[in-house]
């Protein structure tokens, strides 16, 4: 074995920094090209098969504790990097093609990445359907062939590295019992199935004018846009409300030189908000496209939670604890801030909203749709990446599982585009549960106005300093002694 762990870690950080900077520049709309191939080529030595084998051997032989964590996190990084290197051309082509495409409908042309925003703001259900149909036609013709190449190459690499499937590979790398998580999410879906329509349909009718008898998937972006609450979430209060929230926790956003806000609109800007931790904790970008209303608040607060977490990491920690590890942790901190826009105390104090009962019914319905959909996504991806079903059967399975979960006809063409790499769906599901348990702990320790307590901010900063050295299970056990349990989400949706 010839690998020097410290040297490998240093080179890995240089690669990640360059890749995240390119990701930021392209997806924030600053540049048309997505030039990741030269970055992978400059650092190709990180992703040689021998490096993966050395790291796997080190991880298997490492003692428990931080030494074992370092080896595991770097092993996952190396495998992801090997796959990324093998599929870099397809990834670049996907990003650049998506940025260049235009959606045509009713005599109009809009950038592909902006079409979902236009759809979310369109009051006419028929036009929403036309926009989505045009967008999905481009997805099928222009992007799905590339998605399929990436998926097939990833599966081939997992077999070549000695795993029997992509699922088996990521279960070992992430140390997440995906089967156990599926049982928990299936139990959640079963319990909520009897009350799903009763909880969701009144909100659908209130915000779209449509019940399940007439609702289509193309109407959901408009439902989640929630235009009727625009007065509760005025655009001019967006950044100010976020800054005031941080001030209550003892954080001055404009005094943080390492957090860089990108709120400007650009034609090629991704419709998905994101945080780009280019150099943790020294250079963190917070990128939010503008749709309007509640969506913008949710996006800013969610990605702002990521940004504050990364910006608050102890700079002396090894790279793998500052940037790698269990992303359920950083997602939980993001959801913690995101959830504030559903918190009655926060809504009264920051936005002056007193009568929030109807709004909270809406948020519970929206969360129930999301949680059931992501539970179905996990079940689907376990089949997609399990290596036992033919790929040709996947569109129908995807449409069936998604349709059953949300009780709508679901477009099969999304069967590849709706899949994040590396079972990130599991990180989201775990993060939702972790955030609920973390939030309860904050309420118990600091009160309902924890978001306005400097000592709560001090406590969060003590957690942020650890980066992702501990996974979500370890961090929760250390904080509260509890076990991570998805069943807590039943209370979150009133089921």
Image: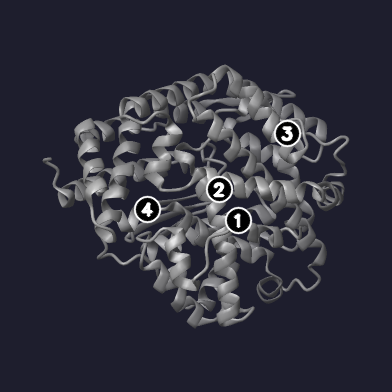
Query: The N terminus appears in which quarter of the rendering?
Result: top left
Q: Tell me if I can see residue 207 in this picture.
A: yes
- The residue mark sitting in front, 2 or 4, is 2
- Disc number placed over residue 403 in the picture, else none: 3
- At mark 3, the secondary structure is helix
Q: Earlier in the sequence, mark 2 or mark 4?
A: 2
The residue under label 1 is 486
Q: Earlier in the sequence, mark 2 or mark 3?
A: 2
Q: Earlier in the sequence, mark 3 or mark 1?
A: 3
Instruction: Name the residue rendered at 52%, 59% in the picture.
Output: 332
Q: Quadrant of residue 134?
A: top right
User: Circles 2 and 1: CB distance less than 8 Å?
Assistant: yes
Instruction: Name the residue rendered at 68%, 64% in the picture.
Output: 342
Q: Earlier in the sequence, mark 2 or mark 1?
A: 2
Query: The C terminus appears in which quarter of the rendering?
Result: bottom right
Residue 119 vs residue 382, the one in the foreground: 382
What is the distance, in whole Å, between disc 4 and disc 3 at their CAs? Answer: 33 Å
Q: Is residue 54 left or right of residue 476?
A: left
What is the distance, in whole Å, between disc 2 and disc 3 at their CAs? Answer: 21 Å
The residue under label 2 is 181
The residue under label 4 is 325
What is the distance, in whole Å, between disc 2 and disc 1 at their CAs? Answer: 8 Å
- Disc number placed over residue 377 in the picture, else none: none
Q: Please tell me how crowded label 2 is: few (under 14), some (14-19), or many (20+) other residues with Cα within 10 Å.
A: some
- At mark 1, the secondary structure is helix
User: Circles 2 and 3: CB distance less than 8 Å?
Assistant: no
Q: Earlier in the sequence, mark 4 or mark 1?
A: 4
């Amino acid at each position: 074995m010839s690998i020097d762990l410290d040297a490998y870690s240093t080179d890995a950080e240089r690669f990640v920094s360059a890749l995240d900077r390119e990701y930021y520049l392209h997806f924030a709309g600053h540049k048309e090209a997505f030039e990741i191939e030269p970055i992978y080529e400059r650092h190709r030595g990180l992703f040689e098969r021998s490096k993966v084998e050395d790291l796997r051997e080190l991880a298997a032989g490492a003692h428990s504790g931080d030494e074992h964590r370092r080896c595991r996190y770097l092993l996952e990084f190396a495998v992801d990097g090997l796959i990324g290197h093998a599929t870099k051309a397809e990834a670049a082509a996907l990003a650049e093609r998506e940025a260049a495409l235009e959606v045509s409908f009713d005599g109009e042309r809009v950038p592909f990445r902006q079409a979902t925003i236009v759809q979310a703001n369109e009051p006419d259900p028929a036009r929403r359907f036309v926009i989505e149909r045009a967008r999905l036609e481009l997805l099928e013709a222009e992007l799905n062939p590339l998605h399929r190449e990436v998926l097939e190459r990833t599966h081939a690499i997992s077999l070549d590295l000695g795993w029997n499937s992509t699922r088996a590979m990521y279960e070992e790398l992430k140390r997440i019992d995906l089967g156990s998580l599926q049982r928990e999410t299936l139990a959640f879906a079963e319990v909520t199935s009897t009350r799903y329509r009763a909880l969701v349909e009144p909100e659908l009718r209130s915000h779209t004018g449509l019940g399940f008898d007439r609702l289509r998937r193309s109407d959901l972006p408009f439902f989640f846009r929630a235009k009727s609450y625009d007065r509760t979430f005025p655009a001019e209060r967006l950044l100010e409300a976020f800054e005031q929230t941080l001030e209550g926790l003892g954080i001055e956003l404009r005094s943080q030189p390492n957090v860089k806000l990108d709120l400007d609109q650009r034609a090629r800007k991704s419709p998905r908000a994101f945080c780009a931790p280019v150099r943790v904790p020294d250079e963190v970008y917070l990128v939010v496209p503008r749709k309007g209303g509640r969506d913008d608040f949710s996006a800013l607060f969610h990605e702002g939670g990521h940004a504050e977490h990364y910006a608050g990491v102890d700079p002396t920690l090894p790279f793998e604890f500052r940037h790698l590890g269990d992303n359920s942790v950083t997602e939980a901190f993001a959801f913690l801030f995101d959830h504030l826009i559903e918190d009655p105390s926060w809504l009264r104090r920051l936005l002056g909203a007193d009568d929030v009962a109807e709004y909270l019914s809406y948020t519970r319905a929206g969360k129930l749709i999301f949680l059931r959909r992501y539970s179905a996504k996990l079940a689907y991806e376990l089949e997609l990446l399990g290596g036992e079903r033919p790929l040709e059967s996947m569109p129908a399975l995807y449409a069936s599982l998604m349709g059953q979960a949300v009780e709508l006809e679901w477009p099969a063409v999304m069967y590849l585009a709706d899949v994040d790499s590396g079972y990130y769906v599991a990180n989201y599901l775990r993060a939702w549960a972790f955030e609920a348990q973390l939030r309860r702990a904050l309420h118990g320790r600091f009160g309902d106005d924890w978001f306005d307590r400097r000592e709560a901010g001090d406590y969060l900063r003590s957690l942020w300093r650890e980066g992702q050295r501990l996974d979500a299970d370890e961090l929760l056990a250390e904080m509260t002694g509890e076990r991570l349990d998805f069943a807590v989400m039943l209370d979150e949706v009133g089921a």
